[in-house]
């Protein structure tokens, strides 16, 4: 009888759970190794390993569709928990050039807290007979014997596996572990708009109020340094997040937080902070610049290991791409394993995964580089100029806004923004 095939996922957060779900269809045994205790959590809860869980999280349309394919019925499950669902194009968004038009887009957007989503995914993944969890366990390094054959842990010693997936997030030690086993240091792309978050939950009246809606006020270089978002989430709560770019920072004391909100032009954010009952303290989160480790350029890449999610590329969370990209990468890993032997699949995946990052990376960093005072690369300057023109036209061009949202949600090519809007012209009128 052949030995059972084993996969090991380092990291039991969102990216690790989605990856474990994909691997469960392809390996006899899947083990999740997580530093925090997660198996004793019966419901949603913040944990030490995800300090960003106190802040809003965006799931773009492509990510939501991918999750629904992997976890059928997830959207309805979250809705029963109180997570609202709406068309993204109908939400009021305040850009520096003005308010977005209300346009039906078919981009269904569900808003919820990070703990609620992780709890739902964890419940489903741990119910799979092939998946086990070693929580409360710290990984200390990789084991390599020609190829990567497992990990060293502080509690359970060496754990062997045919495939190790590093999904530890942006604050993990993937780079250190890989360099310890002889992998060359990769080039690193970094763009830092010096963004920070400060978030606080508020009680939401279940009775609709027209002056309280999910809404965003965007920052935009070089002048709009302050912004914020108010989102409706489960348990009849508003989650208000105030953000600052280029070093601007929202205070964490209640009075300072309220004053910062009052300084914004978005009335929905101001009203939520002014009128609603606070349900907890203010939490701050910083260090949110973009950082991409170009493992796709490392030659040779060792067999038996891959890196994905924020451990590979931490994207500016303001643009909401991170969770969607992680889900897309997990699916890509599954398809690559289906077509190639494991060691060949690792090298191919690590090269091909860069394609999933091109659009979100250039969308976010082109805008973030506007905060730089030195010279920016020509490609970034051109992309920034195009995006500035698009954002400037959004308030007066509903069709352009609809196309822009489809690009942002990763369901359409950026080339659609270059196509002229289809408009009916009177017969004989000159184009």
Image (cartoon, rainbow, N blue to C red):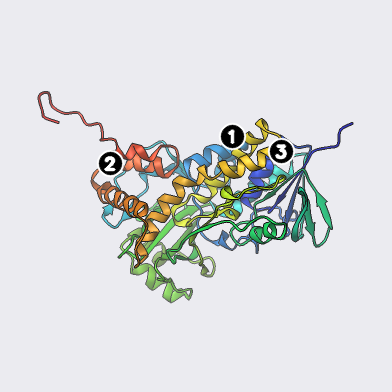
Q: Which residue is identified by label 1?
A: 69
- For the residue pair 314 and 149, the one nearer the viewer reads as 149
Q: CA distance from mark 1 to mark 2?
A: 30 Å
Alpha-carbon neighbours of circle 1 within 10 Å: few (<14), some, or many (≥20)?
few
* Vertical arrangement, residue 285 with respect to residue 122, above or below: below
Query: What residue is shown with label 2?
Result: 398
- SS category of the residue bearing label 3: helix
| Residue hosting label 3 | 342
Quarter of the image with the C terminus is: top left
Q: Residues within 10 Å of mark 2 (few under 14, many from 20)?
A: some
Percent of width and height locating residue 305: 69, 47
Q: Are marks 1 and 3 in contact (CB under 8 Å)?
A: no
- Residue furthest right as drawn: 1
The answer to whether the residues at label 1 and label 2 have Cβ atoms under 8 Å apart is no
| Left or right side of 301 for 375 | left
Near-viewer residue (251 or 163): 163
- The mark nearer the N terminus, 1 or 3, is 1
Verify CB contact (< 8 Å) between mark 2 and mark 3: no
Q: Residue at x 34, y 63 (%)?
A: 375
Which x, y percent locates residue 291?
51, 58
Query: In the picture shown, does residue 288 fall above or below 301?
Result: below
> Is 140 situated above or below 338?
below
Nearest to viewer (mark 2 / mark 3): 3
Circle 2: element type: helix
Mark 1 or mark 2, earlier in chain: 1
């Amino acid at each position: 009888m052949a030995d059972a095939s084993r996969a090991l996922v380092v990291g039991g957060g969102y990216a690790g759970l989605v990856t474990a779900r994909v691997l469960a269809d392809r390996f006899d045994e899947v083990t999740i190794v997580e530093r925090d205790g997660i198996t004793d959590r019966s419901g949603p809860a913040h944990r030490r390993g995800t300090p960003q869980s106190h802040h809003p999280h965006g799931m773009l349309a492509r990510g939501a569709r991918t999750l629904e394919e992997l976890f059928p019925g997830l959207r309805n499950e979250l809705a029963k928990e109180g997570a609202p669902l709406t068309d993204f194009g109908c939400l009021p968004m305040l850009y520096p050039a003005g308010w977005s038009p209300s346009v039906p887009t078919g981009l269904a957007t569900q808003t919820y807290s990070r703990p609620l989503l992780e709890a739902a995914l964890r419940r489903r993944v741990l119910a799979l007979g092939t998946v086990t969890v070693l929580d409360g366990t710290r990984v200390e390094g990789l084991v390599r014997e020609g190829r990567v054959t497992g990990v060293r842990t502080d509690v359970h010693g060496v754990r062997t596996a045919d495939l190790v997936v590093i999904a530890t997030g942006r604050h993990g030690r993937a780079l250190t572990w890989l360099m310890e086993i002889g992998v060359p240091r990769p080039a690193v792309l970094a763009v830092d708009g010096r963004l920070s978050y400060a978030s606080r939950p508020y009680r939401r009246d279940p009775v609709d109020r027209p002056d309280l809606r999910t809404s965003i006020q965007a920052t935009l270089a070089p002048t709009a340094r302050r912004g914020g978002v108010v989102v409706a989430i489960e348990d009849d709560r508003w989650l208000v997040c105030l953000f600052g770019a280029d070093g601007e920072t929202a205070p964490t004391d209640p009075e300072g937080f309220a004053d910062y909100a009052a300084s914004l032009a978005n009335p929905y954010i101001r009203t939520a902070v002014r009128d609603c009952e606070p349900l907890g303290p203010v939490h701050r989160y910083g260090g949110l610049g973009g950082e991409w480790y170009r493992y796709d350029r490392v030659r040779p890449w060792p067999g038996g290991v891959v890196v994905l999610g924020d451990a590979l590329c931490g994207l500016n969370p303001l643009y909401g791409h991170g969770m969607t990209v992680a889900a897309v990468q997990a699916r890509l890993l599954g398809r690559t394993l289906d077509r190639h032997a494991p060691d060949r699949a690792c090298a191919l995946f690590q090269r091909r995964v860069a394609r999933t990052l091109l659009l979100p990376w250039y969308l976010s960093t082109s805008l973030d580089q506007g905060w730089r005072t030195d010279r920016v690369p020509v490609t970034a300057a051109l992309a920034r100029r195009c995006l500035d023109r698009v954002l400037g036209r959004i308030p007066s061009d509903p069709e352009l806004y609809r196309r822009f949202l489809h690009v942002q949600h990763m369901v359409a090519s950026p080339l659609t923004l270059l196509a002229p809007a289809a408009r009916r012209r009177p017969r004989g009128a000159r184009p």
